[in-house]
Each structure stands twice: as structure tokens, then as C-alpha cells.
Amino acid sequence: MDKEELELELLLTAVYRLSGFDFRQYMKSSILRRVQNRLRLEQLPGICRLTEKVIEDETTLKKLLQDFSINVTEMFRDPSFFKAFREKVVPQLHSLPEIRIWHAGCSTGEEAYSMAVLLKEEGLGPRAKIYATDMNEMVLQRAEKGIIPLTKMQLYTKNYIQAGGKSSFSEYYQTDSQFAYFDPELLKGIMFAQHNLVTDGSFNEFHVIICRNVLIYFNPVLQAKVMDLFGESLASGGFLGLGSKEAIRPEMAGSFNDFFPAEKIYHKK
Amino acid sequence: MAFKKKQFIALGLTIFFLFVLLFVILALTSTIKSNMLEIVQDRYDKVNRAMEIRQDIFQSDRRILQALMQGEEGSGALTATDVNGLSSNIRENISELEGMLNKNQSKRLLREVKAGYESFAAMEIRILAGLSAGASPDEMMAIYNAENAARSQLFERLNSFRDYQEGLIGEALESSNEAYSQLIASLVTAVAAAIILISAATLWVIRSTNRSLISITEGIRAIDYDNLSEIPRLKQETNDEIGQIASSFNMMAASLENYHAQEKKYTAEIAEQNWIQTQSAEIINLYHKSTEVESLAEGFLAKLAPLSGASLGAFYLMDGDRSGTILKKISSYADSGETPARGTIPEREGLVGQCARDGRSIYLEEVPGNFTPVKTAFGEAVPACILISPVIVKDEVVAVVELAALRHFTKPEKALIEKVLETLGIAVTNILGRMEVERLLLESQAQTEELQSQSEELQAQSEELQTQAEELRMINEQLEERSRDAEEKSAELQKAKTELEEQARQLQLSSNYKSEFLANMSHELRTPLNSILLLSEMLTEDEEEALTEEQKEFTRVIHSSGQDLLELINDILDLSKVEVGKLDVSFDEVNIRDFGNRIGQLFAHLASHKNLEFTVSTGEDLPDVFHTDEQRLQQIVKNLLSNAFKFTEEGSVKVNVERPGLSELQRLPKWTERNDWLKVSVADTGIGISQSKQRMIFDPFHQGDGTTMRKYGGTGLGLSISREFARLLGGIVQVESEEGKGSTFTLYIPSLPDGLPEESEYPYIPVNEEVAPAVEMAPGPSADEQTIPDAGEAGPEVEAVSLLAGKTVVVVDDDRRNIYALTNALKKEGMNILTAENGSECLDLLSQADQVDIILMDIMMPVMDGYTAMKKIRGLEKGEDIPIIALTAKAMKGDREKCLEAGASDYVSKPLKLDQLLSVMRVWITKE
């Protein structure tokens, strides 16, 4: 084990002990980059110094935690995924009296908003409950407000159209000079809650779990563990949607069938 | 004698006797029959005829007698006829009898009868003739009587003939009886003889046949069907058919024995084959179960050795590399630890090596004593034979198996070994292949995982990059903003620097004034002033009438001066109160129309005194009710008017109370569309204020310059107070002026029913800040504001500044009502609006306009519809990036797709909702 790795481990242990957030099973390469980024910003010479600062100074810890939480998201991100979901998965959900959907790692909530829009357009709105969770409470607070910077709305509109939107995207927001405000009625249908995939367990049985571009930050052991959690939380015949670069791990392949592999939608056996 | 001949004899004898008997019986019966016929036909007929003759004679006799008795003529003829008939009958019978008779005796008798009758017939003829001649009956009678004796003789002869014949009948009967007895006797004899003969023949046949058959049956019965290897043979006693059966049976038995022997042989062979098959199948079964060659070899030897009777075994696998092929022992059976079979053997070395080289089995029978012995707990023994066999696949040796046994291998054992070795090669290569495939699979799986983790890492990196890019962009934006700010600031700073130096001096000066003034303007100042005012007023009233008119005038001046002084002091106190925020403002309903009138009344006197034209005009569209502090408003306007009158020697002073235009309001920093606004402007034709001075006039204790103060008097507090009051009312005072031509002061205040909002929204403007006459533009959102608003503020707030203000929109719609409605709504947002009624008008507009920020495009239009227009706009160089919002009629899916294809950025369905339309426009006007 080289020195840097040791330093990193000490830092992550410190972070875990101080905050309860466990990043020790995250991809080393990714975490290391984030740490180095923080080192640059703080102008610190090495990880040890950062560890020291994290222990002494709570704001640095908070900053570091924010660094670790990567919040890249869009509404209707990868439109083809949402199109496939609309065309292939939605028909299968029509027969359910209640549909529970879990967005694990929802970040600032854009995908959950997208799902709310999609389900409304498909007439499933009243029956659907969307649970959107993330480990980062700050992004959740933003997500709960449904406020989106105006600059992003053009991209979202394009995504919405490509994802097979059935109405005008502008039906779902209002704007002022800086922000768009997501439809409060739709926002009401989404429950935002803090949940850490690393440390927390299953909290309900779902018909659909969407967890896109979250597992990429985890090492294989943690990925397998989280997959287990999803397997446990999915109803039989439920759907799992992953990110475009993710896939069911081979050891879990027995519990899932390919449903629409091109868009990484899987079907629990 | 043949069995057939015997049977022929026995049967033939019987038939022969049957024929003899038949002939005897037939002969006898025919004799009896001829006798009986003679009796019946011949004798009886003769008797009968004799009787008939006698009868006829008798009858003819009686006729004649009758005719004699009656004697009548006629009757004689009749009788003659009858007698003639009878006579012929009799003759006929006699002649017949003559023909029939064959015995002399009877012939003689008949001749006598014939002769007798002839005489009788002659008599009758005579009688008849007599009668017919009429002779007397007596005569006749006599003739008749004469014949009596002859007649009796005739009868007698007839009777003897009959008797003779009857005697002949008796004789014939007797002879026939005799013949019958003879027949019976001969029959009985013949039958008895036949029975004896037939019985004897039959007995002989049966006995001889039976004996042969029994000997055969016993021979067959003696066969043991469970053991057909030895079948007892039959003795061939006779040469007949039965003898032939015996010989056939013997032949059959021989062939059966033969077959049985062969069958036994085959069964043994099949059993052997079966054994080989079963055992080999069992061993071959191993091949599928094994996943590694070692385990296969282990299992193979463990099975094969006991089956083949081997006590030692070793399995060598060909292991080829560049340096040469070697045989590696990978498994053994009952191998001893001390003298292990050799671990590796180079090719061609020893028999094993040679076997691998040749690909042929080697079988050693005489094994020397120093070979690896077979060991048990009781001892050890050198194996008797050793079999070294190659395992071959497609002419290539892949392994060698060596087996040793204490006894020689039996044929089936060898066959078994051969058989299992045949397929072992394929199994070994299969397993080797499978192991290779597995290894490759694992490798590829590992590679896949590596690839996946790499791709995941790439994704993670790209996300991080996005995050970092986002951060960088934010930082960049802020940096740009700051550098822009910095540039502006540095320019401003440069400008301000000189101003500041100037102002610093002025400030120094004014601050001196101020402190000087305030030092004097103590509270106590008012006390003496009060007494002066009180006393001067008392003096003016002059109750005792002691003063002259001139003195009275003096006291009035004293009083009014004191009054002015008090006002001045109050002003200063007000101003300082405003500055320390102690001045109360109470917002209430104000009648603006009356307000104008009141102001007019207040200054009409002064105007006429100074001989100035004074007008107060009130706008038509003023709100009825306006919420503000009337007292302060009045103070502001009064101050402005005082100044106007003060600095105007000739010309006019005009007050204008009206509702301000939207464009004016948008220029105000504090404008919100929420409130009604009031504009009060005071214009004069006075001395005016130079550009450089306009900045300071709102400062306290300042007038245009020192000379002004000397010339016009006054404290220089009026405008400061006005401005502060305006601020307290949420408004602003601006000035436009040209030196020597006059000034216009304009007051803008909002109607504030709920009082003044928090300071934050109407920030305190420091006294020294530049306010007028610069037209203030709304500041754009600064980078700092690009943060998410606090919780609890969800939902768009009414903005201080419209994002759309100043932007140019092209509204394309063929319906004028829609254009009108949209124009009105968008005007309120402060947008510049261009309208077009169809696509081609829109294109014309675009080619003329300098800057178009957004286009609202209806679809169904005459001349050129929205789709075509959008396509054409996208074809223009300047039209590539203009956001186009398509206004589609009640969102049809196909319409939307056509819009997007034609180049629309977004679409909104009709009927339009203003909120939604404005939201979409804000989205698309925002620069990414």
C-alpha cells in the first residue's frame, strides 16, 4: 500500500468517524481526484494536512462532503432512457393499483421531476408515489424546492422533447428572471428523504428503482452490496433502471432478467 | 413291410369281404325273388285262369238252362249272344294257359279240359240252334241232360288242373324257404370269416405301428430341454416311415446340439461385450463429470484398474512445449511412495516414451524382478505382465496409460482397456479444451469487468469533469462579472477620484457649515426665539394702542422674521431627524385632485406678487385614491415650488400632477409593477442649474453657489429635505435643468397602502450618492444573485427587474385580436414588440430589424404559414439562433413534431396562458 493510499484511507476514516458518511468503499480513483481538487482549493500540500484540517474545522469537513457528493443531473437525462421507460415499462405498470418508485441518489431531484412529468402524461400520476433519496441533505433541500436555474431550461426542454414528451414542457414550470419553478402540484407527489446507500437498508417495497450513475462511484464490493439492497427492495417483477455505463453485476445476474438492455432496464425475476 | 402297405392290406381286406358279402346276398335274394315271382305270377295266374274258365262255363251253362226254362223266342237270341261272349272268353283263357304251361303234367290236364269244353260248347250250340229254330224245351232239355255226365267230367278236370297248380305253388314256396335258409347260413359264415380276417389284419398293423411310435416317444421324452448340449439318439428299428422319423429326429438333435453349442458361444461373447460396454460406459461417464485432466486421470485409473484386474497403474499426459515433448505423470494407482513411477519421461525414452512415439500398445509378459512390486499389507509381488497403451486422438498421442497385473490380462479385459482408451483421447482433449476455454472465459470476464470498471470510471470522471466544469463555469462567470465590475469601477473610480477630490473639499466645507449650524441650532435657540415671537405678536396686537403705525409694521416684521427663523430651525431639525431615521411617516388615503388645487391656492398669492405665470395641471387618469403621507408630499412640493419661485424672476412656474408612463417608470430603480405611481413635476423658467452643480444641489446647505445664497437667501435645505422625504415615501426626485433657461424637478412616488416595505427593498440611498439627472437603468442580475433563493420563497416572486424588458419580440399571428392582446401583455413587460401577420411579413421584419431576441410564431396563417416561415428563418444567417416559440392550436402530437422539424425551439399550445408564455420566453431569452 503506498503512502497516498494510506493517507486517503486515514482521511476517509476520519470523515466516517466525524460525519457518519462512509466513502471508504467508493472508487479510489474518483475519491482521490475529489480530494486533490479540495487540496488545490484549500492550497494544502498533502492529504494528511487535509485530514488534520477536517478534524479541526467543521466547515472544511462540510466542504469535503460536498465535494464527494457529485451532483450532476438533468431533467430527462439520456432522453432515450426515459423514452424507453415511457414506451416499454409504463404499459407494464398500468395494472398496478399503486406504483412506488424509488430514485436512489436523486441529487437535486431533476430525474424525479422528470418521472413525475412522465407519469402524469401517462395517466399514472394519481397512483404513483415517487421516493427520491440522496445522502446529501443540502442537495435534497434544493430538490424539495423545485427551483431550476433558467440557464438549464433550454437543455431540459430539448431533452423533454426527445424523451417523447406529450405536451408542452412549459406546462410544468413558471419562471422569473433567474429561475424556473417546477409545478408545485407535481412536486407534492415526490417524497424527498435522506438515505445513504452505503449505510442504510431497505425502507419499502418498490415497483421501480431508478439509480443512474450512482454505482459508478462505488467499488465492486459496494456495488454488489447496493445491488443486493435493490434486489431486496424490489417487488417481484419490478424494474431496475441503471445508468448508461452501468450493468447488473454478474453475481446478481441470477436475480434479474434483461428487460431493455440497450437502456439498462432490468426486470426482477 | 411298409406301414402304408400294411394299412392297404388291412383296409383292402375289409373292402374285399364287403364286396363278397354283397354278391352273395344279391345272388341269394335274386333266387328268392325269382321263386316268389314264379309263385305269384305263374302259378297263381294259372290257378286264377282255371277258376275263371270254370266260372264262365258255369255261367254259360246257367244261361242256357234259363233259356230252356223260359222258352221264349226272343230270349233265345239274347242268350245266344251271352253264351258266345263267354265261350270266346273261355277259349282265350285256355289258349293263354297253353302258352304258359311248361310242365307236361299240366299240359295234359289242360288238353283234357279243352277237349271236355269242346264237347260242352257243341252241346250249347245245338241247344241254341234248337231254341232259335223253336225246338221244344223238352227236347232241348233232353239234349242238355244228355250232356250232364260230360259236364261233370269237365268240372272234375278243371278241379284237378287247379289242384295240380296249387301243388306246384306249395313246392315253389318250399324251395324258396330253403333258399332263404341257405342265404342266412352263408351270410353268417362269410361275415364271421371277414371279421376274423379284418381283426387280425388290423391288430397286426396297430401293434407293429404302436411299438415303433412308443420307442420314438420315449426317445423324445428323454430329452433334457435345459441342457440341449447332449440329446439322446433314437434306434432305427424299422426301415419304414417311423424309422425315417427316428433318423430325422436324430439329425435334428444333432443340429440342435450344434446350435446350442454355437448359441452358448455367442452368449458368452455377448456377455463379454456387455461387460465391456457397461464398464466402459461407466468409465466414459467419468469423462463428462471431470472438469480437470488430473481428476479425470485419477477417476479413470481408479475405475479401470480394478475392472481390468490391474494392480498398478499410471497415467502420463503429453506435455509439449518448445523444448520437446515430455510425458508427465498426472495420476497413478496403487503406486508406492518409495518407488514411485517416474514423474516425467521424455519422449522415446523407455517403453512408455516409445509407446507415446509409436502410438501402439506394448504388452510385456515376462517382467523382471526389480520392477515396481505390487504391495499389500501381507507382502509384495512383481507383476506378471505390463500393458502400456497410448491414448490417441486423430493419430496423435495425447497420453499414455500403463497398467500392471499379477496375472495376465484376459481378452475382455484387454478389450475393455482398448475400448476405454479409444474414447479417452477425445475426453482428454475435450477437458483440456474446456479448461482452456474456461481459462479464456475467466480472462475475458476479468477483461470485461476491467473494461466495465474503466468505463464506469470514465463516466465518473466525466461526471466529475462536468461538476468541475460547472464549478469552473461559475467561477469563470463570477470572474468575468468581477472583471467587468472592476473595469467599470476603475473607470468610475478614475472619474470619481477627481470628483471625490472636489467633493472632499466641498464636504469639508459643508461639514463645517453643518457642524457650525447645528452647533448654533441648539434646542435653546428656540426658547429665546419663542419669546421673541410671542412678544412681537403681542406688540403687533398693540392692545394699548401705544405704538405708531411704523412701529407696528416693525413688530410685524420682527414676528414674521422670527416665524421664518423657527421654520428654518424646524427644517434643520427635520433633516437631522430624517438622517437619524427618527422622522415618522404615516401613510393614508390622499385625494390627489384636491391636492393639486391646494397647492395652487397656496402659491397663487406668491405668483401674482412676483408677477409670474403659475399653472397647476392635473392629469385625467389619476387614481381616485392614492396612499401616501400627504403632509410630507405637500412639504416636498412646497419646497420645490418655493425654490422655483425663488429662482425665477420672470416667466412661468408650472406644476403637473399626472400618472407616469410605463417607459418612464421602467427607468426608475425602485419601480415595481405592483403599485400605482404619481408623478409631480415642477418646471420653472428661472436661472437653471449648471451640469456640474446639479449633483450638489440635493446636498444640505448647498445652493447653486455662494453667490446664489447671497442673492436669493434661503438655507439650501429645501432640496435635501425634499429628497429625503421622497425617499421616505418610496419615491425619488429628479432634476433636469439648463443654466439660464430653467429647471424641472420631478417627483415620483408610489401608492403604498401597506406603508413602506423593508429597507432591503428600498435601500437607503446615501445623501451623497448621485441620483439625478442620470437615467438609471435597471441593474442586471449580478453573479452573487445566481444562488438559489431561501426556503419558503418557492414560487416566482414579483420581480424588481423584468428579464424581458428591453428585449425585442416578433409576434407573428394573422389574428389582429391576438396581436393586440399579446402586444398589450408584452408591453407591460417592457418589451419592444414587432408584429407580423404572416410568415413572409415576419421574414421582411427580420431582414430590417437590427436585433430580434425571440419570435412567437402562429402556425396557421395565410400567404406563408408558420412551418415554412420557421424553415426559412432557420435558413437565414441571423435566424439560426433566434429562439422561436411555436403557438400551436390545441396541442396535436403531429403538429408539435412538425413544428420541431421546421425548427421551432419550443411550443406552447393555444389558448395561451400569459404566465406560461412569459415563462417560456424567459427560458429561451436566457443566454446559456
Image (cartoon, coloured by chain):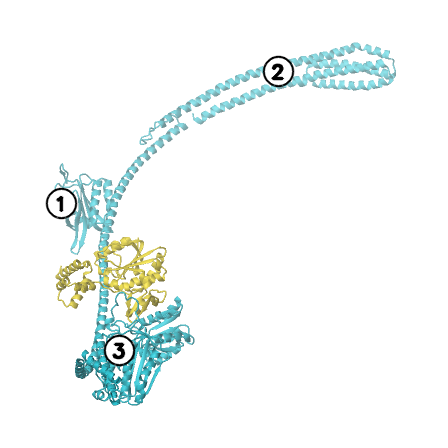
Chain colours: A yellow, B cyan
Check the image and report above or below for B331 versus A143. Answer: above
Q: Nearer the viewer, mark 3 or mark 1?
A: 3
Q: Chain of mark 3?
A: B
Q: Which residue is mark 1?
A: B340
Checking the image for residue B176, the label placed there is: 2
- Residue at the (41%, 72%) spot, across then down: B860
Check the image and report above or below for B729 versus A113. Answer: below
Residue A229: in sight, yes or no? yes
Disc with the residue nearer the chain's start (1 vs 2): 2
Q: Secondary structure at mark 1?
A: loop
Q: Nearer the viewer, residue B532 or B648?
A: B532
Q: Chain of mark 2?
A: B
Q: Are marks 2 and 3 in contact (CB under 8 Å)?
A: no
Q: Which residue is mark 3?
A: B725
Q: Does label 3 lie on the same chain as label 2? A: yes
Amino acid of disc 3: Phe
Question: Residue B892's x, y, as percent?
Answer: 40, 67
Check the image and report above or below for B605 versus B589. Answer: below
Q: Secondary structure at mark 3?
A: helix
Checking the image for residue A22, the label placed there is: none
Image quadrant occupied by the N terminus of chain A: bottom left
Question: Residue A134's x, y, as percent?
Answer: 25, 60
